[in-house]
Amino acid sequence: MKYWLRYSKSGLLRFVGHLDMLQTWERILRRANVPMAFSQGFSPRPILSLAAPLPVGLSSQAEYLELETSEAVPALVEMIAPVLPQGMQVMGAARVPVGTKSLMGLFRWGDYLVQNLSKSQQELLAEQLPSFFTEKTVLQEVKRKGGLRTVDIRPLVYSASLEADTLNLRLALGSVANLRVEDLLRYFSLPIEMLEVSRQELYLEINGGLITPFQYISGADSK
């Protein structure tokens, strides 16, 4: 059986990296006595993955774990909740229909909040954002494997809006196209170290529209 779990990550857990987070989840599931499914071979491992690794230092309300179990687990959230570490909360779980693609390959966009902007930063963004969206091409150095690369980030920004001291962003995310929030902030001369950044939701793009993973599962169940 395959499940998708949505969970939040805050506090000191913001500084736990991708591989350590996977190990943390393995310990959580063992303590909760979840009947995990294991890979075959000389060194079997639990079959689980984090669908969209979060950069270290960011909090999130929309982390997703993909998990395979050896049997159905109707009360998965209730089993896990008592053994979660501080700074983590499971916000929902859904059983995935057979044949559904891996969640890691389905994500296309992510929502972020950038908070605690100073007055000067707010004024700068108020001037820069309108011109950013009128440009056909916006070249920026971004971090990629092997070092920095210059790419056109304009099509990678779905939307950006300023509300008081908060910047709302929807950025490309996933295997097809990806823009790290820190790369965009650097374009606007905003130091991510001085700001509070959190991920709010992740989306799949289906037939030209954006839906959440659980909406996708609900639609698959209704077919």
Image (spheres, rainbow, N blue to C red):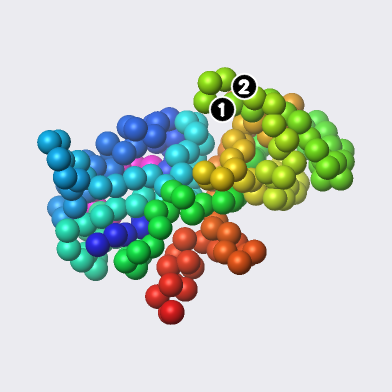
The question of residue 86 being in magenta is answered with yes
Tell me the number on the disc at residue 148: 2
Contact between marks 1 and 2 (CB within 8 A): the answer is yes
The question of residue 61 being in magenta is answered with no
Image: magenta residue range: 81-87
74 sits to left or right of 122 = left
Q: What element carries label 1?
A: strand
Q: Quadrant of the N terminus?
A: bottom left
Q: Position of residue 160 (x, y in %)?
A: 73, 47
Give the answer, above or below, for where 146 lies relative to 49. above
Residue at image position (29%, 47%) is: 48
Depth check: give the residue in front, 193 or 172. 172
110 sits to left or right of 41 = right
Instruction: Give the residue pinned by disc 1.
Output: 144
Residue at image position (78%, 35%) is: 138
Q: In which quarter of the image is the C terminus?
A: bottom left
Q: Is mark 2 on a helix, strand or loop?
A: strand
Depth check: give the residue in front, 162 or 220. 220
Depth check: give the residue in front, 134 or 64. 134
3 sits to left or right of 163 = left
Residue at image position (42%, 43%) is: 9
**Residue type of the residue flagged with mark 2:** Leu
The Cα atoms of the two marked residues, 1 and 2, are separated by 6 Å
Which quadrant of the figure has residue 35? bottom left
Q: Position of residue 24 (x, y in %)?
A: 28, 38
